[in-house]
Amino acid sequence: MARSEEAKCRICRREGVKLFLKGDRCHSDKCAFERKPYAPGQHGRDRKRETEYRLQLREKQKVKATYGMLEKQFRIFYHRSDIKRGATGENLLSMLESRLDNVVFRLGLVASRTQARQLINHRHFTVNGIVTDIASFIVSENDEIQVREKSRVKAVFKDSVEEAGNRVEIPSWLELTKDEFKGKVLRTPEREDIVDDIKEHLIVELYSK
């Protein structure tokens, strides 16, 4: 499973926005972004020149970090979005939101997307009753995502389900059944469902050059 080895808190500080990459720590006073809200490194406090290219690049890097993707995989998602009917940027966000690791996170079954990827990789989840260990799997309307029965006794799932809906709000395109550790995809996510501050047109402009 390809993943970035960079410290999560450094990513948030560099992008200048809280990306909630470390789960509960991001909601506590231990959050590094809250204590040091400036870019890491010797020149982190220096004012950067805001060029058009820099804005586009930083937006792409921010979205990549949010969904935990490397450049090659992100570019593949972009090209798939570009050939689909509709606005490329909106298609891209819809595909990113439909990734299994993101859906597990949005349902509140885990504390972060990073944790979701790890637990999916360790085969703790099923999609429509079939064990799935591919974090980038794209879910579809009416798909059911569930924690495997033998995994439900683990504290990581008990604690997360208990807090589901409190830590993060469950979006309207998903439905959670707490007592069954199960979520359902009610429909394909649309642009208005994504409340994160993402300027997808900057990403489209960057890749269109």
Image (spheres, helix red, strand yellow):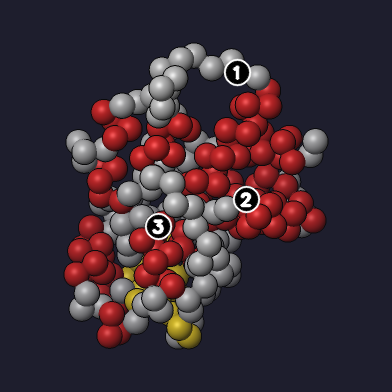
Q: Nearer the viewer, residue 5 or 209?
A: 5
Q: What residue sits 25% from the left and 42% below the top?
A: 27
Q: Earlier in the sequence, mark 3 or mark 2?
A: 2
Task: Residue at 76% x, 57% y: name it.
Answer: 84
From the viewer's side, name the closer residue of 171 and 59. Answer: 59
Q: Position of residue 70 (x, y in %)?
A: 57, 53
The image shows a total of numbered marks equal to: 3
Q: Quadrant of residue 122?
A: bottom left
Which quadrant holds residue 45? top left
Tell which tag, 3 or 2, sits nearer the viewer. 2
Q: Is residue 101 above or below residue 91?
A: below
Q: Which residue is mark 3?
A: 114
Classify mark 2: helix, strand or loop: helix
Name the quadrant containing residue 9.
top left
> Is mark 1 in CB contact (under 8 Å) with mark 3?
no
Which residue does the image show at 74% across and 41% down from the upper left? 207
Q: Amino acid at mark 2?
A: Glu
Mark 3 residue element = helix
Image spot of residue 136 (x, y percent): 55, 65
The secondary structure type at the circle numbered 1 is loop
Residue 67 seen in this snapshot: yes
> Mark 2 — residue?
71
Identified by mark 3, the residue type is Thr
From the image, tell me which residue sits under label 1.
50
On the rendered structure, is 160 left or right of 95? left
Q: Is residue 127 visible?
A: no
In this view of the protein, which residue sits in the foreground, 68 or 189? Answer: 68
In whole angstroms, how far apart are the C-alphas of marks 3 and 2? 17 Å
Point out the image quarter for the C terminus.
top right
Q: Percent from the top left, x then y, of residue 204?
A: 71, 40
